[in-house]
């Protein structure tokens, strides 16, 4: 089984459009009735395309599953760096990375569940590729943790262990969203989880930084100026002393 999914169509825009259409239908069906019992014909019917058209873009059913699982991992690699753009404060970068990770899961719950249920259905080489992508995406979070340690915001900690605690906690949103979704948004879920996980490792300086980051994020969410912005505005409006 090839590591890459080879399409017979050579127009990238059309390949992306059609594969997205096929994947959406496949993820829904695989999640509802299982990967092994779902046929390509059923995927085609759900996607409102012909079976023959599907085979222009994938070779078989495993290709479709592989693309669905790769898309989840590639989403972390796209969206976490975007969330970090323009951020210099290590604690803010850490929070932004974890929140971006959680948003990917929230937007792709069914595909995330497939990662747990059906990765074993792929060939060995493809499973190894997914593991490599997982390590690559997790490093985006572990790098932020290391920066916080280096700046004295976190105590010395097993970085990989903390990274996987965070990753598994975020994945639990997909596994247990039936319980949490009615009570919390994904942002609230991540914030509360980080409060619990960081308590043993965050330093006094880190607590002050974390409080400042939380204050800025809350202000942005509510459309209010942050405390720093309010101070700047106050200084600008103050009367000069004579």
Image (spheres, rainbow, N blue to C red):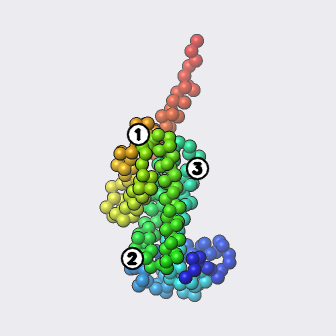
* Contact, mark 2 vs mark 3 (Cβ under 8 Å): no
The earlier-in-sequence mark between 3 and 1 is 3
The earlier-in-sequence mark between 2 and 3 is 2
Q: Which residue is drawn at 61% across and 79% down?
A: 6
Q: Residue at x 57, y 26 (%)?
A: 236
Q: In which quarter of the image is the N terminus?
A: bottom right
Secondary structure of the residue carrying numbered label 1: loop
Q: How crowded is mark 2: few (under 14 residues within 10 Å), some or many (20 or more)?
A: few
Camera-side residue: 46 or 2?
Answer: 2
Q: Can I make out residue 4 in this image?
A: yes
The vertical placement of 28 against 39, above or below, is above
Residue 97 locus on image (x, y percent): 50, 52
Task: Report the Cα–Cα distance between label 3 and label 1.
Answer: 25 Å
Q: How crowded is mark 1: few (under 14 residues within 10 Å), some or many (20 or more)?
A: some
Secondary structure of the residue carrying numbered label 3: loop
The disc label shown at residue 56, or none: none
Query: Label 1, on which residue?
Result: 203
Number of numbered labels in the structure image: 3
Residue 120 locus on image (x, y percent): 43, 76
Q: Can I make out residue 50 in this image?
A: no
The disc label shown at residue 32, or none: 2
The earlier-in-sequence mark between 1 and 2 is 2
Which of label 3 and label 1 is nearer to you?
A: 1
Query: Label 3, on which residue?
Result: 85
């Amino acid at each position: 089984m090839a590591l890459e999914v080879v399409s017979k169509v050579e127009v990238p825009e059309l390949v992306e459009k059609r594969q997205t259409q096929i994947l959406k239908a496949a993820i829904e069906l695989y999640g509802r009735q299982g990967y092994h019992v779902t046929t390509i014909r059923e995927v085609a019917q759900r996607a409102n395309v012909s079976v023959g058209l599907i085979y222009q873009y994938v070779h078989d059913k495993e290709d479709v599953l592989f693309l669905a699982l790769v898309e989840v991992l590639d989403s972390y690699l796209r969206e976490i760096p975007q969330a970090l753009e323009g951020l210099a404060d290590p604690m803010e970068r850490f929070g932004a990375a974890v929140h971006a990770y959680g948003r990917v899961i929230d937007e792709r719950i069914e595909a995330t569940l497939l990662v747990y249920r059906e990765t074993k259905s792929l060939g060995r080489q493809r499973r190894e590729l997914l593991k490599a992508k997982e390590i690559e995406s997790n490093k985006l979070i572990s790098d932020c943790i290391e920066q916080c340690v280096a700046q004295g915001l976190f105590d010395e900690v097993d970085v990989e262990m903390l990274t996987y605690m965070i990753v598994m906690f975020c994945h639990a949103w997909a596994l247990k969203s039936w319980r949490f979704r009615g009570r919390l948004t994904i942002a609230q879920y991540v914030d509360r989880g980080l409060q619990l996980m960081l308590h043993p490792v965050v330093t006094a300086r880190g607590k002050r930084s974390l409080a400042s980051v939380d204050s800025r994020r809350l202000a942005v969410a509510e459309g209010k100026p942050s405390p720093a912005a309010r101070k700047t505005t106050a200084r600008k409006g103050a009367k000069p002393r004579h």
